[in-house]
Image (cartoon, rainbow, N blue to C red):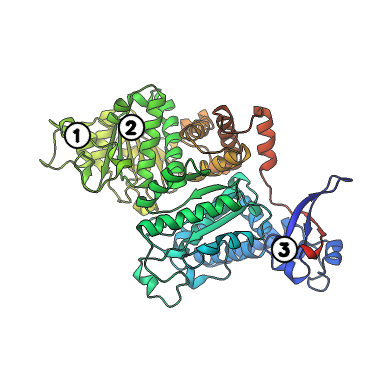
């Protein structure tokens, strides 16, 4: 049931929306509602006379009014509720406000505030957004998809709510994550909001607090698992392919035991990727590429220690491995340079509980024979750093202070310019601080963090710590894959994204120890990544056969800027 269609006037060349709603119906449609910005002609032709006050506002005036209201909210949660309310009333105004204040509002629409919102979503729910697929309605998936009012769907962000950020199983209250991720796709890359659909697979929850909460709005049963889970997801993917054959499907915040399985199962069957695995790895890889430029060394010269082998840690390890292979190493040589650490210690060939994505980095007993250990029989992260002679140390463990003075000091002894990434969120979970790295390495350590840290001065030099934010890669990856009409997303596309991102860090930024560009430049970053991804898709036989210059034009043209379209009445018989 489409509510509007994009049209072009053959006489004037004017782009406009042919609208099939009238009066109050238009004002309740978040993409069509322009509120006080409707022109006199639109008010007359669309049955809006008498429903609006007489003054006509510009989008900029509306945005200023909304920003002033935003500033009056007493805390971040109230700001989140306000912005979600604005999104559900007037999408164009919401995105105009967000894109013009992205750095300020990013922590509100996404981490960390979105996590707090997901923990309360059933209690603060005002309006529904997106689609919820459950065991009760999966049999009607075609009917559900065909009832969507969007004219086209090119991007779906889907979660099953089992591992929302670091908060665990939040059931269908995890919908805040797909909604927030789409906010970033639109703001950072310029995907058109009318082409983006957030979906939650509401498969139940094992969170007893939610099951016992009378206000919880989700499917109040234990989670589907095993064969039932697999069959459900298969029906979902087939439904997506039938109804949206040109869509990009992003898997978001699935638990590790399902995330790797689904990525592997569907990567060649539908255009898709997992940002928690591949996006996180690509941004970290880009920061490492910049670090290598500063060190004037190659990846093959490094010894990598990665702590925390969940989706993020495994994704980072895989991207480092792929880069080592790119530099000409064999499989064995590449794996020998990567040391994986998790709660039980160094990942060994006989370590219990790890699956294949982690086990590929397991060490044999022979490889650690003769290591000097602080405590015999137990290999700590300090022991790994010491014995492996680590030059790169990466943490995604959510263990505050894990990289202590002894570990940081040993890193400084191992190499002149140690690379130390403390990527856990939020700030109080960071494995160390940039100031601690600077103190332990005499300011020579190269650092990236998962949470934002303020610039600081060390020995008279300003040091700016780059935040390894997935937003640097996934919006451009999505845009590039879509405009090239790629049939699948490959490891080479992510490597090209990482290389492009690293190339955008200026010499001046590198002199301040920045390993990633300024986030304020995210639209330009997304453009360049989209172009690199599209060209890689073409050159690998997976994308459109057009020139580099044509791709530049297509991508720039695809980057939507929040602005109001002109409306013309269409036939209401199309409803």
Label 3, secondary structure: give it. loop
Crowd band around label 3 with a 10 angstrom C-alpha radius: few (<14), some (14–19), many (20+): many
Upstream in sequence: badge 1 or badge 3: 3
Q: In the structure shown, which secondary structural element does the residue marked by tag 2 occupy?
A: loop
Q: Secondary structure at mark 1?
A: loop
Question: Residue 33 bears which disc, if any?
Answer: 3
The x, y position of residue 21, in whole percent, is 76, 65
Q: Nearer the viewer, mark 1 or mark 3?
A: 1
Q: In the shown orientation, is residue 5 left or right of residue 533?
A: right
The answer, for residue 6, to whether it is visible in the render is yes
Q: Residue furthest right?
A: 11
User: What residue would you read off at disc 2?
Assistant: 418
Instruction: Pick whichever, 249 or 480, lies toward us.
Output: 249
Foreground residue, 443 or 166? 166
Identify the residue at image location x=38%, y=72%: 211
Say if residue 423 shows up in the picture. no
In space, the residues marked 2 and 1 are separated at their CA atoms by 26 Å
Q: Residues within 10 Å of mark 2 (few under 14, many from 20)?
A: many
**Can you identify the residue that label 1 sits on?**
364
Q: Nearer the viewer, residue 551 or 225?
A: 225
Q: Is residue 153 left or right of residue 27?
A: left
Disc marking residue 563: none
219 w.r.t. 452: above or below: below
Q: Quadrant of the N terminus?
A: bottom right
In x, y percent, where is residue 365? 16, 34
Sequence-wise, the earlier of marks 3 and 2 is 3
User: Given this view, does label 2 or label 1 mark the residue nearer the observer?
Assistant: 1
């Amino acid at each position: 049931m489409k509510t509007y269609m994009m049209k072009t006037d053959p006489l004037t060349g004017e782009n406009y929306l042919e609208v099939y709603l009238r009066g109050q119906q238009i004002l309740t449609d978040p993409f069509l509602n322009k509120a006080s910005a409707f022109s006199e002609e639109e008010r007359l032709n669309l049955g809006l006379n008498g429903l609006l006050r007489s003054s006509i506002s510009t989008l900029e005036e509306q945005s200023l009014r909304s920003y002033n209201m935003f500033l009056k909210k007493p805390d971040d949660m109230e700001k989140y509720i306000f912005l979600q309310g604005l999104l559900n009333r007037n999408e164009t105004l919401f995105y105009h406000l967000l894109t013009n204040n992205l750095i300020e509002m990013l922590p509100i629409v996404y981490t960390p505030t979105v996590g707090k919102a997901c923990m309360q979503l059933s209690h603060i729910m005002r309006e529904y957004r997106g689609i919820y697929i459950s065991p009760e309605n999966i049999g009607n998936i075609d009917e559900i998809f065909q009832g969507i009012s969007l004219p086209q769907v090119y991007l779906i962000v889907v979660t099953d709510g089992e591992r929302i950020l670091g908060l665990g199983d939040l059931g269908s209250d995890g919908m805040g994550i797909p909604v927030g991720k789409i906010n970033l796709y639109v703001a950072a890359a310029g995907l058109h909001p009318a082409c983006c659909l957030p979906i939650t697979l509401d498969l139940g929850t094992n969170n007893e607090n939610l099951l016992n909460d009378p206000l919880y709005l989700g499917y109040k049963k234990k989670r589907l698992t095993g064969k039932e889970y697999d069959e459900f997801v298969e029906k979902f993917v087939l439904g997506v392919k039938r109804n949206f054959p040109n869509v990009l499907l992003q898997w978001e915040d699935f638990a590790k035991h399902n995330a790797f399985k689904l990525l592997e199962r569907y990567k060649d069957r539908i255009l898709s990727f997992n940002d928690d695995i591949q996006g996180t790895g690509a941004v970290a890889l880009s920061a490492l590429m910049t670090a290598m430029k500063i060190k004037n060394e190659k990846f093959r010269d490094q010894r990598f220690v990665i702590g925390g082998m969940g989706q993020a840690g495994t994704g980072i390890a895989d991207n480092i491995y792929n880069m080592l292979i790119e530099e000409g190493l064999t499989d064995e040589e590449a794996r020998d340079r990567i040391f994986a650490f998790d709660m039980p210690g160094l990942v060994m060939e006989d370590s219990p509980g790890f699956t294949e994505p982690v086990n590929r980095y397991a060490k044999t007993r022979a490889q650690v024979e003769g290591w000097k250990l602080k405590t015999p029989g137990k290999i700590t992260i300090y022991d790994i750093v010491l014995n492996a002679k680590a030059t790169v140390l990466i943490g995604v463990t959510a263990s505050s202070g894990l990289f202590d003075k002894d570990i940081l000091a040993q890193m400084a002894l191992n190499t002149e310019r140690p690379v130390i990434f403390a990527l856990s969120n939020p700030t109080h979970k960071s494995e160390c601080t940039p100031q601690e790295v600077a103190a332990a390495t005499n300011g020579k350590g190269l650092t990236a963090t998962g949470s934002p840290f303020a610039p600081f001065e060390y020995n008279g030099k300003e040091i700016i710590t780059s935040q390894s934010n997935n937003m640097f890669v996934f919006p451009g990856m999505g845009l590039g894959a879509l405009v090239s009409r790629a049939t699948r997303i490959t490891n080479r596309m992510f490597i090209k994204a990482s290389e492009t991102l690293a190339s955008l860090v200026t010499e001046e930024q590198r002199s301040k120890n920045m390993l990633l560009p300024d986030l304020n430049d995210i639209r330009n970053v997304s453009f360049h990544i989209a172009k690199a991804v599209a060209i890689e898709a073409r050159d690998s036989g997976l994308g459109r056969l057009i020139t580099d210059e044509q791709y530049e034009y297509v991508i720039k043209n695809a980057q939507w800027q929040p602005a109001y379209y002109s409306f013309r009445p269409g036939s209401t018989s199309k409803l």
